Image: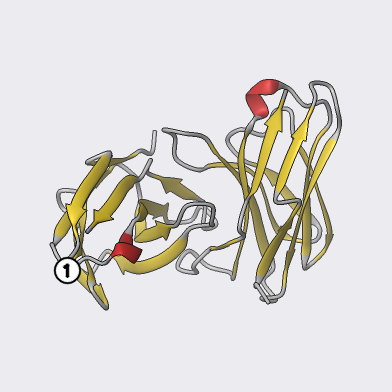
């Protein structure tokens, strides 16, 4: 089984709808991250969490919220989806320290009509 | 502002040929640099990591170099295979930023028969 899983893998929704993307990991890592990837742009950090009680905004957090339900679970919500949130979303996990590799999930392709 | 620039944006080579991808960065203070491979529809996977004191690192047919003075890195792929077709992303981490990463936009490599 994959170490980092994301659900759903694909989602099409309409403007104004609330959407939740879920991420689970079995690597036992404390640190979890949400990124979005757009064509022609590098991955950009939305939110990150260093443990269950620690949530931090990334560079593009506006319009998003997160919940760290447990060490292994980190969900991303779009309270009222808009078309420019159409993107590929990745969850990642890592151990502590600057040298630890981030392990990425398979991604969720979200389309907002 | 921390930035990572990659070139070329895309590249097509014949199977069996070698190629070199470039990365320039302005991340400070520098901690480490990774090259990730991202297959279509998948999350990025780390190929190599280099710290300030390392100037070359190999992983099979992949060899990465780092010049910390000029803030440049390259990824050399030897004897390319069809399975090397992917996006290659240069990712730089700054010291003391909790493993927050700056991503390049990637080089899209296509290996053809």
Q: Nearer the viewer, residue A20 or A50?
A: A20
- Using the image, name the chain to which the residue with label 1 belongs: B
Residue lying furthest front? B113
From the image, which quarter does the C terminus of chain B lie in?
bottom left
**Residue B68 in sight from this viewpoint:** no
Is A36 on the left or on the right of B9, as rendered?
right
Q: Quadrant of residue A63?
A: top right
Residue sitting at 42 percent across and 54 percent down? Answer: B93
Q: Which residue is mark 1?
A: B78
| Residue at x 17% of width, y 69% of height | B79
Residue drawn at x 70%, y 63% is A5
Kindly identify the residue that appears in the image at 86 percent across and 27 percent down.
A17
- Residue A51 drawn above or below residue B92: below
Residue A44: where, in percent of width, then height?
53, 40
In this rendering, the answer to whether A30 lies above or below A77 is: below
Measured from the top left, where is residue B39 in percent x and y? 45, 57
């Amino acid at each position: 089984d994959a170490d980092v899983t994301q659900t759903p893998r694909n989602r099409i929704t309409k403007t104004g709808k609330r959407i939740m993307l879920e991420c689970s990991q079995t690597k036992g890592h404390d640190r979890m991250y949400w990124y979005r990837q757009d064509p022609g742009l590098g991955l950009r950090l939305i939110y990150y969490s260093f443990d269950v009680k620690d949530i931090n905004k990334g560079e593009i957090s506006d319009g998003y919220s997160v919940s760290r339900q447990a060490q292994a679970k980190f969900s991303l919500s779009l309270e009222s989806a808009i078309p420019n949130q159409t993107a590929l979303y990745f969850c990642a996990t890592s151990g502590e320290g600057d040298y630890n590799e981030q392990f990425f999930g398979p991604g969720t392709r979200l389309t907002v009509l | 502002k921390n930035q990572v620039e990659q070139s070329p944006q895309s590249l097509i080579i014949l199977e069996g040929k070698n190629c070199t991808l470039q990365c320039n960065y302005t991340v400070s203070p520098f901690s480490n640099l990774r090259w990730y491979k991202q297959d279509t529809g998948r999350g990025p996977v780390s190929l190599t990591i280099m710290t300030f004191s390392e100037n070359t690192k190999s992983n099979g047919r992949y060899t990465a170099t780092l010049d910390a003075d000029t803030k440049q890195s390259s990824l050399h792929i030897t004897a390319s295979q069809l399975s090397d077709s992917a996006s290659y992303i240069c990712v730089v981490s700054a010291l003391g930023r909790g493993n927050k990463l700056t991503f390049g936009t990637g080089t899209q490599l296509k290996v053809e028969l």
